[in-house]
Image (spheres, rainbow, N blue to C red):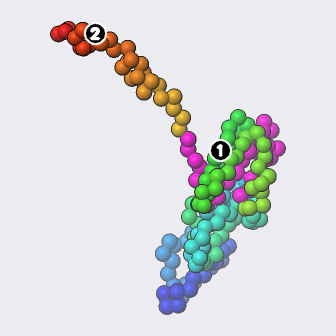
Amino acid sequence: DKSTGLERVLSGPQAIVPTPMEYSPHGMERGVYLTMDGAVIVLNKISGLQRLVTSCNHQSGVFVPDWSEEVLAQREIVHVLPHEAMVVRDVSGIMTIYSGRAANSSMQGQGSCVMGADASSAAGGTAFFLPPYDRIVRMHWSTYSSITAAREAAATTNVTPATGTDAGDPLA
């Protein structure tokens, strides 16, 4: 409503007649279907906080945000196989390790909808939704083979003691 600034959300099949001062900047929007493999990140426009809405903490199959909420993104479930591990860093810098071998019972009850080895697959593993503000830590491993090869090449250069030049130099 342009005159009062209030918003209203109507859900379900019904005939809607807006008042002259009402407008919808995005038009008609659809609710988001929540499955066991999908979740949504919801922004509270009043407090500015984000929250994760999953089928674990929202019993209805369709999520319709309130007037003060906005759906920011949809998230897919993250699967960690039995031979894998994943490190997740939250906004305060605390790192959590998700291992595919053991179920993460410490994260259950925090709205993250962690599923242990028996729930994610018959072969084992862990599955979880990445909470808002959290990031997956990427680690890059290297053997430094290019630096070692350069050092070995520098160590094998022959210097002639009499002239002090490279033995492979054609002008020497």
Q: Tag 1 or tag 2, which sits nearer the N-term? A: 1
Residue at the image point whose x is 82% and y is 44% from the top: 118
Tell me the number on the disc at residue 20: none
Q: Which residue is mark 2?
A: 160
Residue 119 among magenta residues: yes
Q: Which residues are magenta?
A: 112-139
Amino acid at the residue labelled 2: Thr
Q: 10 Å neighbourhood of mark 1: few (<14), some, or many (≥20)?
A: some
Q: Residue furthest right?
A: 118
Which residue is rendered at x = 57% and y = 82% of the image? 7
Q: Residue furthest left?
A: 171
Q: Main secondary structure of the magenta part?
A: loop
Tag 1's secondary structure? Answer: strand
Q: Position of residue 48 (x, y in %)?
A: 57, 73
Distance (Cα) linking label 2 and label 1: 54 Å
- Where on the picture, by quarter, is residue 146? top left
The x and y percentages for residue 35 are: 71, 55
Examine the rendered structure and indicate whether residue 112 appears above or below residue 155.
Answer: below
Quadrant of residue 130 within the rendered picture: bottom right
Q: Position of residue 4 (x, y in %)?
A: 53, 90
Which of the labelled discs sits on residue 86, or is there none?
1
